[in-house]
Image (spheres, rainbow, N blue to C red):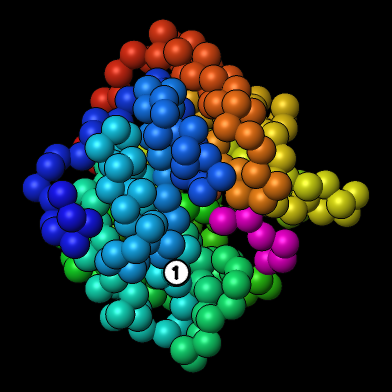
Amino acid sequence: MSPHHQSSRPPHALDPLCAGIGLRPPHYQALLGKPAAVGFLEIHSENFFGAGGPPRRYLDKFREDYAISAHGVGLSLGSADRLNPAHLENLKKLIDWLQPSLVSDHLCWVGVNGRYLNDLLPIPYTEESLKHVASHIRQTQDYLSRQMLVENVSSYLEFADSTIPEWDFLREVAQQTGCGILLDVNNIYVNSINHGFDAMQYLDAMQGADIGEIHLAGFQDTGEILIDTHGAAVSDAVWALYASAINRFGAIPTLIEWDTDIPTLDVLLAEAEKANVMLEQASFAMPTREGRRHAT
Ligand SMILES: [Fe+2]
């Protein structure tokens, strides 16, 4: 099928017991050769906005064999700007064609006054910003005619104006909009060290039924702060927090994020296998996830 044509094919079912990996060009050839090795592939949606060309041709092949999670970085849900209509249109065209199992972006802003920065920036956690970001999420879900997941970001500063703990803010975003949560366990850990809170308190605030995907990644410790680099193996502390999360909430589709200093596919698959073992154990403790709203 031409990548220009829409697909009526239903998305692959996500297997919550089999972790996924990010789809990155150095692994294209190896992944095309062994399609059963990972639970799902996560793409950066913006890299595939062009309706033709090599990226879409490859993705057309991958979507035949893998469930896909479409993860965006450009909606800027927390920006004071209105949502960018061209960005929304490009995203809708991509997901109408791709039929991904999950669609997500971040609880952050990436630009203001029409100027874009190359970073996922935190927002102040106030009643006013909650109303604002919830409105953007509702607009996005209405436009896409589907539920999206919203991910917690890492941060290196906090706003003096914030009046709501990050974990309560994230839960409220989901409760008020019906969006799901992409819970980045590494980002929780990084923020807990950078800002001095108990990471378990974050998990305590979550409703398991809201969580549609989990991210695991590596960070860099500068000695003063932890930086979410996505350039290293998952740390022992983050694996431990992940175990707490899935033992509490049940098996949830989990992604190994590794975007810089990208290792060989075997290294990534070994990380995914570690998650698989833990997901299997968690599924014995909690075999079903009652009340999930967003399984596709
Ligand atoms: Fe993430």
Residue 266 left/right relative to 66 = right
Helix, strand or loop for the magenta stretch, by majority: loop
Query: Does dot 1 land on a helix, a strand or a loop?
Result: loop
* Residue 118 spot, x, y in % from top left: 60, 72
Whether residue 261 is situated above or below residue 162 in the rendered picture: above
Indicate yes or no: mark 1 CB to ligand 1 under 8 Å.
no
On screen, residue 3 above or below 16: below
Report crowding for label 1: few under 14, some 14 to 19, many 20 or more residues within 10 A (C-alpha). many
Q: Which amino acid type is marked by label 1?
A: Gly
Magenta span contains residue 155: yes
Height in image: 83 above or below 287? below
Q: Pick whichever, 248 or 214, lies toward us.
A: 214
Q: Is residue 188 visible?
A: no
Left or right: 81 in relation to 179: right
- Magenta stretch: give its range: 153-158
Residue 113 x %, y %: 49, 91
Q: Is residue 5 visible?
A: yes
Q: Residue 291 at what x, y percent from top left?
A: 24, 31
Residue 245 lies left or right of residue 186; in this view the side is left
The x, y position of residue 92, in whole percent, is: 23, 65
Q: Viewer-proximal residue, 112 or 46?
A: 46
Query: Which residue is at 30% across, 42% downward?
Result: 61
Q: Split into 4 quadrants, where in the image is the C terminus? A: top left
Residue that sits furthest to the bottom in the current view? 113
Q: Residue at x 42, y 29 (%)?
A: 33
User: What residue is shown with label 1?
Assistant: 74
